[in-house]
Image (spheres, rainbow, N blue to C red):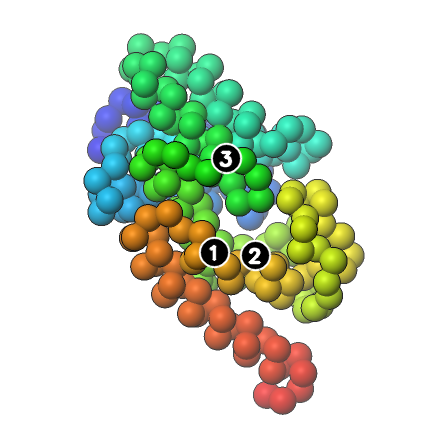
Amino acid sequence: MEDDPRTSLCREVATSNGPMKPSHDLDHVRRVVALARHIARVEGADEVLVACAAYLHDMERGREDAGGEDHAVAGARMARDVLGGSDLFGDREVELVAGAIASHRYRSGPPPSTLEAQCLHDADKLDALGAVGVGRAYMMAGEHGQRLHNRVGGNETARHVGDIDHSRYSPVEEYTVKLRHLPDRMTTEEGRRIARRRAEFMASFFEELEAEVGGSR
């Protein structure tokens, strides 16, 4: 599948992307590709198109972080431009990839409406769970100057990272507000299976953190 020219093109586009924050870098993209391909095989989706969408899903993230538009919206438009300009993709394939990118994010965007979009959606969310998810949560905390531990309210309705009061936020609140609910938001059976296992580990981590911060362990 990696030798498919469509996958190769999308991988090359992804690796040529500009600077990205560590929490959403090329390593994140590669993990999402691996997860999305696995889910696609189990669920019977088009693995090539799922991989293409996964490679391209965060291409516009850096621009959003710099004050640009929603990276899912901009990324879908970019995918249409890049893939539509290649003779490797038919119109239907271009729209499947672009639609998956447009619907992959948690806080905004339409729900995934195709099996391929569901595979990308779940894979991207799974990378926020488990041991990797704990690591990424603290990567993002460092990127935004957040504290190691702080449990406060007021961020529950934030739809974008830019809406969060980072001076009062921490991975503990990210877990409470968002991450612990991700298993319920999975759209495929395989995504739910993996999410449940990863969520168990994450719950035990934050339980231990609470105890250590409180001085009881």
Task: Please tell me the numbered disc located at residue 178.
Answer: 2
Q: Which is more N-terminal, label 1 or label 3?
A: 3
Q: Nearer the viewer, mark 3 or mark 1?
A: 3
Q: Residue at x 62, y 52 (%)?
A: 140
When the figure is inspected, residue 179 is found, relative to residue 95, above or below; the finding is below
Element at badge 2? loop
Residue 12 visible to the viewer: no
In this view, 40 is above or below 14: below
Question: Picture coordinates of residue 70 (x, y %)?
Answer: 61, 32
Question: Label 3 neighbourhood size at 10 Å, few (<14), some (14-19), many (20+)?
Answer: few
Q: Residue at x 36, y 65 (%)?
A: 197
Q: Is residue 115 left or right of residue 102?
A: left
Q: Residue at x 64, y 44 (%)?
A: 159
Distance (Cα) linking label 3 and label 1: 16 Å
Q: Amino acid at mark 2?
A: Lys
Q: Nearer the viewer, mark 2 or mark 3?
A: 3
Circle 3 is placed at which residue position?
A: 110
Q: In the rendered structure, which amino acid carries the disc numbered 3?
A: Pro
Residue 113 versus residue 87: which sits nearer the camera?
113
Question: Do residues under tags 1 and 2 come within 8 Å of each other at their CB atoms?
Answer: yes
Q: Position of residue 177 (x, y in %)?
A: 60, 59
Relative depth, front residue between 161 and 153: 153
Indicate the secondary structure of the residue bearing disc 1: helix
Of residues 167 and 145, the one nearer the viewer is 167
Q: Position of residue 214 (x, y in %)?
A: 67, 83
On the rendered structure, is 155 left or right of 60? right
Q: Quadrant of the N terminus?
A: top left
Residue occupied by mark 1 = 182
Note whether residue 206 is visible: yes
When asked about the image quadrant of residue 94, the answer is top left
| Residue 91: % across, % down | 34, 14
